Image (tube, rainbow, N blue to C red):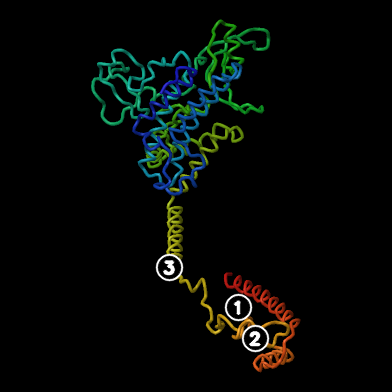
């Protein structure tokens, strides 16, 4: 909606956005692109943009403007308007750069850009004396609104989508024409060069000999400054009665016009004006350099002329390339180079060779994914975790008892007639492959003494044997923990 507290130019940009968003062409670009239905979009498009995002940025800029100092508020508004125009153009360019956009989306992007360029120039960038009032910024009304339009037959232009009263055309139309109809603005071309109020004005300039002569402003063109700002400025071509020519920048020209009492409003948003191509139904689309029209150019064949008129990509590529005949490559701005490279990429992407290569790559990728799925499906748990060999598993008894006769203890009473047993935990038993011969003898002697019941076991030897068993148990527990970790790994 509208923001009454915002500056006039921002409100006009909001009106343009509101009007463009209500057209059928803007329907695919209102919200961000869904990556589920458009795979690979965000990998291909480096600067995604939608109408909703443009509106949010405009609203945020209008709130920020109220907190900016008055000295920099004017430059801030100019930058916001310039960025607004760039963002809408990015939306149309993105659909052209995405290979899976489809013919319907491409046509919608082309129509969206045509409608936007007309509204942006006529409602925002035009000179102040040609701007309609904020109350009349309604595209449902005629372009040149009059009260009689309410009850008259309105004709829609096939170039800019503008509405015109058939009775107020020059000459008036009595019936709807057959085929495509283009309005007078599209036929003549409409851009800043056709709207500049300085064109045709006369100023007095010194020729160098002290005599003043009248110079007439013929045309204007944009050049980019060589300073750190690199912003565009207007240069005007002047001619005197002796057919001599000279150039003046916009500041010098306005100063000379003020001396003659002709005060002209300064150009607002000069950077946005320089980037606006205007609109036209011709091949040049606002680039007015008096080039020979394509259909009547004897150097162009009929088939090439037909392709030029029917294909917007071919037409834009030819127009962008023809600028090198008029402007040196060093003077080309970054946006013109970017547009030319984008068109060349689109041309290469639409070629049969690139199409077959893309199909081949997609087919190879599909085959690899299919084989990978098949290999994954055949995998078994045994391929990941191999089985353990059963020969390596030894069964160990849970408990082992060592009977000891209490009658052989010295200095102790017999508390029970039954023989006591020393129980050893099975986990403390370690399987040893090699045993020392001396240890075997000691174990055999100890076993025979216990079984015979006649030998006496000293208390000190019992304590030492208990200590030995504890140490062996600790060592066995440590070994078990190590084996457990190995099995887990």
Residue marked by disc 2: 404
Q: Nearer the viewer, mark 3 or mark 1?
A: 1
From the viewer's perspective, is residue 138 above or below residue 295? above
- Locate residue 360, reporting x and y percent: 44, 59
Q: Quadrant of the C terminus?
A: bottom right
Q: Where 304 sits versus 55, above or below?
A: below
Cα distance in 3D space between marks 3 and 2? 62 Å
Mark 1, Cα crowd under 10 Å, few <14 / some 14-19 / many 20+, is: few
Mark 2 or 1: in front is 2
The image shows residue 259 at horizontal and vertical percentages of 59, 6
Badge 1 marks a residue whose secondary structure is strand
Q: Residue at x 51, y 35 (%)?
A: 322
- First-in-chain label (2 vs 1): 2
The answer to which of marks 3 and 1 sits earlier in the sequence is 3
Label of residue 377 in the image: 3
**Relative to 355, 429 lies left or right:** right
Give the side of residue 224 with respect to residue 187, left or right. Answer: right
Q: In terms of depth relative to the viewer, which is nearer, 411 or 449?
A: 411
């Amino acid at each position: 909606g509208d923001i009454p507290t915002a500056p006039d130019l921002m409100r006009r940009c909001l009106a343009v956005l509101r009007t463009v968003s209500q057209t059928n062409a803007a329907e695919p670009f209102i919200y961000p692109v869904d990556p589920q239905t458009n795979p690979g979009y965000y990998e291909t498009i480096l600067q995604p943009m939608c109408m909703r995002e443009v509106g949010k940025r405009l609203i945020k800029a209008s709130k920020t403007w109220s907190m900016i100092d008055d000295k920099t508020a004017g430059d801030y508004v100019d930058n916001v308007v310039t960025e607004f125009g760039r963002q809408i153009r990015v939306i149309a360019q993105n659909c052209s750069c995405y290979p899976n956009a489809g013919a319907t989306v491409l046509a919608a992007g082309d129509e969206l850009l045509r409608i936007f360029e007309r509204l942006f120039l006529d409602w925002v960038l035009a000179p102040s004396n040609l701007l309609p009032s904020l109350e009349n910024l309604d595209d449902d009304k005629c372009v040149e609104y009059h009260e009689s339009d309410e009850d008259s037959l309105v004709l829609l232009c096939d170039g800019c989508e503008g509405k015109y009263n058939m009775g107020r055309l020059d000459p008036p139309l009595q019936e709807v024409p057959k085929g495509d109809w283009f309005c007078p603005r599209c036929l003549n071309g409409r851009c800043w060069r056709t709207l500049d109020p300085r064109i045709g004005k006369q100023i007095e300039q010194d020729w160098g000999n002290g005599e003043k002569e009248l110079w007439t402003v013929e045309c204007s063109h944009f050049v980019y400054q060589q300073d750190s700002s690199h912003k565009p400025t207007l240069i005007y071509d002047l001619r005197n009665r002796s057919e001599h020519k000279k150039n003046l920048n916009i500041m010098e020209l306005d100063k000379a016009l003020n001396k003659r009492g002709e005060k002209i409003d300064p150009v607002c948003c000069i950077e946005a004006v320089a980037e606006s191509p205007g609109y036209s139904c011709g091949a040049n689309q606002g680039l007015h350099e008096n080039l020979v029209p394509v259909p009547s150019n004897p150097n162009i064949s009929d088939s090439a002329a037909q392709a030029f008129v029917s294909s917007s990509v071919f037409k834009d590529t030819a127009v962008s390339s023809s600028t090198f005949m008029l402007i040196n490559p060093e003077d080309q701005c970054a946006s013109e180079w970017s547009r030319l490279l984008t068109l060349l990429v689109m041309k290469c992407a639409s070629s049969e060779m690139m199409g077959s290569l893309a199909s081949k790559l997609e087919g190879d990728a599909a085959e690899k994914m299919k084989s990978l799925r098949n290999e994954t499906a055949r995998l078994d748990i045994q391929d990941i975790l191999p089985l353990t060999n059963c020969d390596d598993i030894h069964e160990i008894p849970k408990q082992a008892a060592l009977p000891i006769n209490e009658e052989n203890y010295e200095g102790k009473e017999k508390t029970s007639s039954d023989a006591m047993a020393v129980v050893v935990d099975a986990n403390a038993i370690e399987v040893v492959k090699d045993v020392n011969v001396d240890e075997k003898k000691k174990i055999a002697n100890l076993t025979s003494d216990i079984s015979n019941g006649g030998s006496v076991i000293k208390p000190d030897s019992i304590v030492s044997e208990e200590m030995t068993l504890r140490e062996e148990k600790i060592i066995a527990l440590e070994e078990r923990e190590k084996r457990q970790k190995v099995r887990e790994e």
